[in-house]
Image: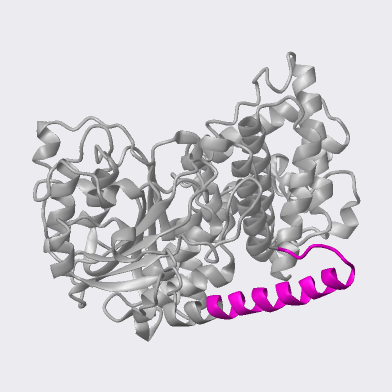
Amino acid sequence: MTEQDHKQLGKTLWNIANQLRGAMNADDFRDYMLAFLFLRYISDNYEKAARKELGRDYPDPDAIGNGGRTPLSVWYEQNPGDVDAFEKQMRRKAHYVIKPRHLWANIAHMARTQNGELLNTLQEGFKYIENESFESTFSGLFSEINLGSEKLGKTYSARNEKLCTIIQKIAEGLTEFSTDSDTLGDAYEYLIGQFAAGSGKKAGEFYTPQRISDILSAVVALDGQAPETGPRKKMASVLDFACGSGSLLLNVRHRIVNSGGSVGMICGQEKNITTYNLCRMNMLLHGVKDSEFEIYHGDSLTNDWDMLREQNPAKKPTFDAVVANPPFSYRWEPNDALGEDMRFKNHGLAPKSAADFAFLLHGFHYLKDEGVMAIILPHGVLFRGGKEAAIRRKLLNDGHIDTVIGLPANLFYSTGIPVCILVLKKCKKPDDVLIINASAEGNFEKGKRQNYLKPEHVNKIIETYKHRNEEKRYSRRVAMGEIEENDYNLNISRYVSTAKPEPEIDLKATYEELVKAEKDIKAAKEKHNAFLEELGLPPLP
């Protein structure tokens, strides 16, 4: 299927969401809909794996009829003594197990026939997949999906009826489309973006606009020491410590793989439990194996992920790429213990009012020497004083800030402020800082509700970074001496102003034009007076 087909499925499902959502909270409905989409995906994959495992013993779907029974349910009935051995094998090969009654095909049939046990069956299925399917892959995955919520209906019957309607419509919408990982994964991403667009400030908790994500992923995918040589062929690991729904991590993986390379381990951390579950679903929906990613639910600032708390420097995990879109100017609680934390000890603690540099230093601490970090931050980190000025000075003096990219205002669903992307490296070759000012008109498209970047705008930023190009009113390589003279202030307009100079006035040419104009006025007046004299009227003075 084409990319357009993938997007069309997302649009179809979004139309269904708008028809069914009604008075229900948008976030609640989002979680239900995405969970059902995920169930469809893992059901299809499981049935394919079962068909391969059972071979000729797999019942013929055409011989079963359309009574809602699945081939797997028929096999279970016919071979009760072999079920345990089969499920053991499926856990080993497919990495999970779904009971026949919990498969999407059965759930969709129950919805279509308005079966009164749909809700109970769905709850039972989610619980089994979470707790018994396979080790920790699905642990807690549906913990925030409350099928007993009064938001679905006041009574069991009302909730069951609502679920029947939602699932039936989703099943009908999926009928026309393939359900491979690319198709459903892209549809999932599309729906997340659409729900984000309607959720205002809360969108920042789980979604980075696609074009901005494209910039970050392209930057870290390029060779760290020589970006002009193109994408790296192998990336052992990538970290996003504020990963939201995981779209940024997937974008990095997609870019590397599409250029013929490979990505080893994808690691993410997310504090919000609902978003954490969305992220894990997103990984699996895009065909990322459970052995290829690790997403942790926890707080990056307090560093409560055991894997990252390793005290032995030789065992400390480090990453080829670090990307992040953390919450802007987040209030946090710095204390003496954090002051001694190896992440912050050499640079100092960010102020209580804005954890921007705390997030940056957290990610930077785990960056490999040859790696690249790209992080989205508010413009204040470029010029604010006090503790932030001291951290900025240290990063600059140590040669860690490689590039500053200024973006237009009103690109995000969650805020209208302009933001910047900082690109950091532990071992960078250039002794200057590339500053890109992409905020001027012509470098973005104005929209009714918000602004957005087009592919050509994104490509220009990437090419400028890649080749370290300089262009008037757009980009410039700024020597450290000039930055020092400006007291380490990185305010973009100090170095790359987008203001167009007033055109120079040629005084001699202007004088000649004035003289000519006076002569023309005199000649016109004389001619006019001649007409007046013929008419017997008084001349103009």
- Residue 98: image quadrant is top right
Does residue 237 show up magenta in the picture?
A: no
Image quadrant containing the N terminus: bottom right
What residue appears at the point 57 percent right and 69 percent down from the top-left corner? 455
- List x then y, in percent, for residue 148: 65, 21
Who is closer to the viewer here, 292 or 321?
Answer: 321
Can the viewer see residue 261?
A: yes
Residue 64 lies left or right of residue 5; in this view the side is: right
Does residue 515 show up magenta in the picture?
A: yes
Residue 495, placed above or below residue 247: below
- List x then y, in percent, for residue 469: 36, 80
What residue appears at the point 84 percent right and 63 percent down from the top-left corner? 537
- Residue 299: image quadrant is top left
Residue 10 lies left or right of residue 260; in this view the side is: right
Q: What stretch is highlighted in magenta?
A: 514-540
What residue appears at the point 70 percent right and 62 percent down from the top-left corner? 51
- List x then y, in percent, for residue 126: 60, 35
- List x then y, in percent, for residue 343: 16, 48
Residue 287, placed above or below residue 223: above
Residue 247, placed above or below residue 31: below
Most extreme residue toward the bottom is 229
User: How many marks overall?
Assistant: 0
Can the viewer see residue 310?
A: no
Who is closer to the viewer here, 160 or 364?
Answer: 364
Residue 391 lies left or right of residue 178; in this view the side is: left
Most extreme residue toward the top is 154
Colouring scheme applied when the structure was drawn:
one colour
Q: Is the magenta stretch mostly helix, strand or loop?
A: helix
Residue 223, placed above or below residue 23: below
